[in-house]
Image (spheres, rainbow, N blue to C red):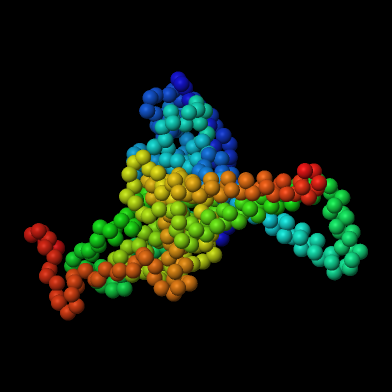
Amino acid sequence: MKREKRFGAGLFSSLNPVGFNLERWSYTVHRATGVVMVGYLMAHIFETFQLTGGATAWANTMSALHSLGPMEMIGLWLVAGSALYHGGNGIRLILNEAFGMFMGKPILPVYPYSPTSLGRSQKVAVWTITVAVLALWVWAGLYLLAGLGVI
Amino acid sequence: MDKITLKVTRSGGKRASFEVRYRKGMTVLDALTEVREKQDSTLGYRHSCRMGICGSCGMTIEGLPRLACQTQVSSLETDSIRIEPLHNMSVVKDLVVDILPFFDHHRSVKPYLIRKDIKERDHSEREYKVLTEEVQKFLQFDYCIMCGLCYAACPTAALDPYYTGPQAIAQAYRYMADPRDEGWEKRVNLLDTSHGVWRCHMAGACSFVCPKDVDPAKAIQLARMEVLRSRVLGKKGKAGSKPVPPPGAPKEGVKPPPFDYGGAKK
């Protein structure tokens, strides 16, 4: 049976968090960082696969990568940030989903409504992860800059 | 603010603008009604109770799924209001969406009490007794008015039309947590699918837009924990752990006294 086209459905709608809650923003960033990591994984597999071509092929791949200059380090810095956020937020989600942490217990709703699953503990968890990831990301950036000999 | 402009997305994706004189206390539904009565009688939208009970007037207002009857124009802090149909549903006409697939998801989780003894369920002579503490485990999820706002806000439902959805999963958990229910295993099997509880990514948008604080995100995680306990530990979770005995049989082998209907005939 042919399905009717659904209004507002699709990837853009799924990833658009404008106007929504903090957790929905976190969902979008989680998805985006996941895509970056999958991209990195593919590139990494391609890179290491060059080893099968012998030492010369490997050396050529490395020199091609190094010829990117600072772009190589910026790419690695993005991957580091993605891995940090995806990992940190992933731990929060596991705690949410498998152990019910930060969700609160079923309550009797009293106006003005404030869902406990998006309550203070959830917000603290999201912000803690965000701040920790940002701090580690800055540190990773400095580490990579030091590798470049900039600092 | 003397006048407001409603920018309504109509059938076929065309956007129509209507100017309405603003009154204090005016809701978006009031404004739409004024448009239909005085400017364009062909404007299609659904509504009924006008007081946030029936859940008919769900629509996307300023980018968020809301009930038009509960959305004060003044709360939007703009004099140009964008109104669209609810997302993730197909459009019937203008702001009227086809909610049948949404109801199908609801029906799929068996949103009713399941008792093994059907005769006892259909012809019970006494009421089921449930402790207040047990009622509190599911009462919050019982307040659902099936408006579909959670489904429209869900980023997973935006990608997967077969996803059971926050409303249906919350209702599944509502019955799983009910000690009178004996369909726990059935619902675990219904939810433990690739389009079931595992598709939720805890964006929390469903709970954010819910007009009744049903908190579907919480219910989904609780349902997921039930499924996990069932599959990993092989036993029932917290919900439904103390089944209520059939009504009229408080003690085994003792016939209960007939229910007192206060003199009224059965």
Percent across and percent down for residue B262 are 9, 58
Rendered position, B179 above or below A64: below
Question: Outermost residue, bottom direction?
Answer: B253
Image quarter where the C terminus of chain B lies is: bottom left
Question: Is residue B61 rendered to the left or right of residue A133?
Answer: left
| Camera-nearest residue between B48 and B129 | B129
The residue drawn where x is 78% and y is 50% is: A147
Residue B23 visible in the snapshot? yes
Question: Outermost residue, left direction?
Answer: B263
The residue drawn where x is 74% and y is 51% is: A76
The residue drawn where x is 48% and y is 57% is: A96
Quadrant of res B130: bottom left
| Camera-nearest residue between B246 and B47 | B246
Question: Outermost residue, right direction?
Answer: A56
Rendered position, B159 above or below B244: above
Percent across and percent down for residue A69 are 84, 47
Count of numbered circles on the image: 0
The residue drawn where x is 69% and y is 52% is: A80
Quadrant of res B28: top left
| Camera-nearest residue between B225 and A83 | A83
| Camera-nearest residue between A30 and B59 | A30
Percent across and percent down for residue A133 are 61, 49
Question: Outermost residue, top direction?
Answer: B2
Percent across and percent down for residue A127 are 53, 45
Question: Is residue A126 rendered to the left or right of residue B67?
Answer: right
Residue B96 visible in the snapshot? no
